[in-house]
Image (cartoon, rainbow, N blue to C red):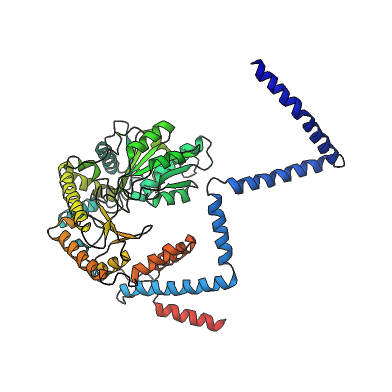
């Protein structure tokens, strides 16, 4: 102790003369300044230093990301570059609009209300015309995901349920106790599926994206209460894009963790090293959308316990498969509330739960976490306003239809559909792995099979299959495509027909593996090579804009010509 005191004394005696020199120089330099000047200069210098600090260490976006964004923004605003970009943007916009217009078969858009209302017979006749626009027959199992059941029997059940509760709204639980009860029962049945105890809870949402948004919102709010300015999500690079949307919406930071190139599962060690004082949640997928692998949730849960960080299991895709796989005779990792550390789970009822589109659940280990997603405005002149999810009014009929679907299948029904889907998935994966020129990415743990190629541009296979009436999902980083197996693919002959078509297309491509790729291959090839990702976002924005376009391309051309004439 005496040695420490002696060392401290020596340090003070050594530093003291230098500090005295600094004091004298500061006082001398300020001797000619008035008090208000000293205050103003101090205030200004503080503002400059704070601004520099915020620029260098802003916790929402990294310095590298902001510098890169500023650089590309500067380049894009150069007159010559700006003109070239605008020319390409206009060209792409016109092409997308023409593509959508061709898909309507020349059927004109309705741009205003009919003068006189239409009869039911007239409406049904018009709806038949709209339905005739669809070219790909999903009922034959030609589509990746999208439609997960589609049987006439189930369609009849859920439409009858919808009709019974068409005018209900869970925003008014006092008026509609029937819907309140059904929503609570849907949540409780899902909590039981995922081995939640009596404290587990949740809400019904409009889909997987909202379920994920709400979980992120809850953890953000909890982090804000602890004084964290920019709460940080740590998740695999393969996690659903809804987490990026949540980070963007709620001003959170999202740190992506790479996955093992062979297994496509997140690198848990790198996830551990990324944890910091701002981390508000860890995420694992069961399975992840691109390649169908299940992340090691038990290891991630252990990190959550060790560092006192909530852990979210994104089971949106596998929500009604994973809970039944063991009973269907398949090995499956533990990803639910049995894992210490897992505090929330998102699961889509409108996928393998076979409920109508627009229904999902977000589940929590206890009500303390769920309260983080609630919104309450106690001071509104219109009364005390409260909503459990992002929406205010919600369709009670969707909840009723979801309840009806779950009650119709029951546990035995879901075990059986799970058995069919998993068996078909593994059969397809095994056969695909034996086709020359392609290979299966990762390990298809549940219902997704992703394939890539070292011999040719894999998007050529996607385009070839599209020409045969298929619609597969295009992936990037690395370039690949996948099939999300649904109940439709378990129909007799559907899987073998798909495999035979892949085999034939791949063999044809292998005869000239270096040929150029058009269609979706050209689009994805170009997009992956663009270093400025905001350009990709701008191009995709054209697609989204075109979805709402109600003008014929000819009308747009006339408008442009007229405008050019004025200029």
Residue 539 higher or lower than 491, as above or below: below
Residue located at (27% from left, 45% from top)? 319
Which quarter of the figure is the N terminus placed in?
Answer: top right
Q: Position of residue 334 (x, y in %)?
A: 27, 38
Of residues 4 and 412, the one nearer the viewer is 4
Residue at left offset 26%, top offset 50%: 444
The quadrant where residue 135 appears: bottom left
289 and 541: which is toward the camera: 289
Q: In the shown orientation, is residue 437 left or right of residue 63?
A: left
Query: In screen coordinates, is 559 left or right of 137?
Result: right
Res 206 visible = no
Image position, residue 210 (x, y; %): 37, 49
Where does the image place residue 346, in percent across and percent down from the top left? 33, 44
Please give left or right for residue 128 compared with residue 477 in the image: left
Q: Residue at x 20, y 65 (%)?
A: 503
**Considering the image in quadrants, where does the C terminus appear?**
bottom right
């Amino acid at each position: 102790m005496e040695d420490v005191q002696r060392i401290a004394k020596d340090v003070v005696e050594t530093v003291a003369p230098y500090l005295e020199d600094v004091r004298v120089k500061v006082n001398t330099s300020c001797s000619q300044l008035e008090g208000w000047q000293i205050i103003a200069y101090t205030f200004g210098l503080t503002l400059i230093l704070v601004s520099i600090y915020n620029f260098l260490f802003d916790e929402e976006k990294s310095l590298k990301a902001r510098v890169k964004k500023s650089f590309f923004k500067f380049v894009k605003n150069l007159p010559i570059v700006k003109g070239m970009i605008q020319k390409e943007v206009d060209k792409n916009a016109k092409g997308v609009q023409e593509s959508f217009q061709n898909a309507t078969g020349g059927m004109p858009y309705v741009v205003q209300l009919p003068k006189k209302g239409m009869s039911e017979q007239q409406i049904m006749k018009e709806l038949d015309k709209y339905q005739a626009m669809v070219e790909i027959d999903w009922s034959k199992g030609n589509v990746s995901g999208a439609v997960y059941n589609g049987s006439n029997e189930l369609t009849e059940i859920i439409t009858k349920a919808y009709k019974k509760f068409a005018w209900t709204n869970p925003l008014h639980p006092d008026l509609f106790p029937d819907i309140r009860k059904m929503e609570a029962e849907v949540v409780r049945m899902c909590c039981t599926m995922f081995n939640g105890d009596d404290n587990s809870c949740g809400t019904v949402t409009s889909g997987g994206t909202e379920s994920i948004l709400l979980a992120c919102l809850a953890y953000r709010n909890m982090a804000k209460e602890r004084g964290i300015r920019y709460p940080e999500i740590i998740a695999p690079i393969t996690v659903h894009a809804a987490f990026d949307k949540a980070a963007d919406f709620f001003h959170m930071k999202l740190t992506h963790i790479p996955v093992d190139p062979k297994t496509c599962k997140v690198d848990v060690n790198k996830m551990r090293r990324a944890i910091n004082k701002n981390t508000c949640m860890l995420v694992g997928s069961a399975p992840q959308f691109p390649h169908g692998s299940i992340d090691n949730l038990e290891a991630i849960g252990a990190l959550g316990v060790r560092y006192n960080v909530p852990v979210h299991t994104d089971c949106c895709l596998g929500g009604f498969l994973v809970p039944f796989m063991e009973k269907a005779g398949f090995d499956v990792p533990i990803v639910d509330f049995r894992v210490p550390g897992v505090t929330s789970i998102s699961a889509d009822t409108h996928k393998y739960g076979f409920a109508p589109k627009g229904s999902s659940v977000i589940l929590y280990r206890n009500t303390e976490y769920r309260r983080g997603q609630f919104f309450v405005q106690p001071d509104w002149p219109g009364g005390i306003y409260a909503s459990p999810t992002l929406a205010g009014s919600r369709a009670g009929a969707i909840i009723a239809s979801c309840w009806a679907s779950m009650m119709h299948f029951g546990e035995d029904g879901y075990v059986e559909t799970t058995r069919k889907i998993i068996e078909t998935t593994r059969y397809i994966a095994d056969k695909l792995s034996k086709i020359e020129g392609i290979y299966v990415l990762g390990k298809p743990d549940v219902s997704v099979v992703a394939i890539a190629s070292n011999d040719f541009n894999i998007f050529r296979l996607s385009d070839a299959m599209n020409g045969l009436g298929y619609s597969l999902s295009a992936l990037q980083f690395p370039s690949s495509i996948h099939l999300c197996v649904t109940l439709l693919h378990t129909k007799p002959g559907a899987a073998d027909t798909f495999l035979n078509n892949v085999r034939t297309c791949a063999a044809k491509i292998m005869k000239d593996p270096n040929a150029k790729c058009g269609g979706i291959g050209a689009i994805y090839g170009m997009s992956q090579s663009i270093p400025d990702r905001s350009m990709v976002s701008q191009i995709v924005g054209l697609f989204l804009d075109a979805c709402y376009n109600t003008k014929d391309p000819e009308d747009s051309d006339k408008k442009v010509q007229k405008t050019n004439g004025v200029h």
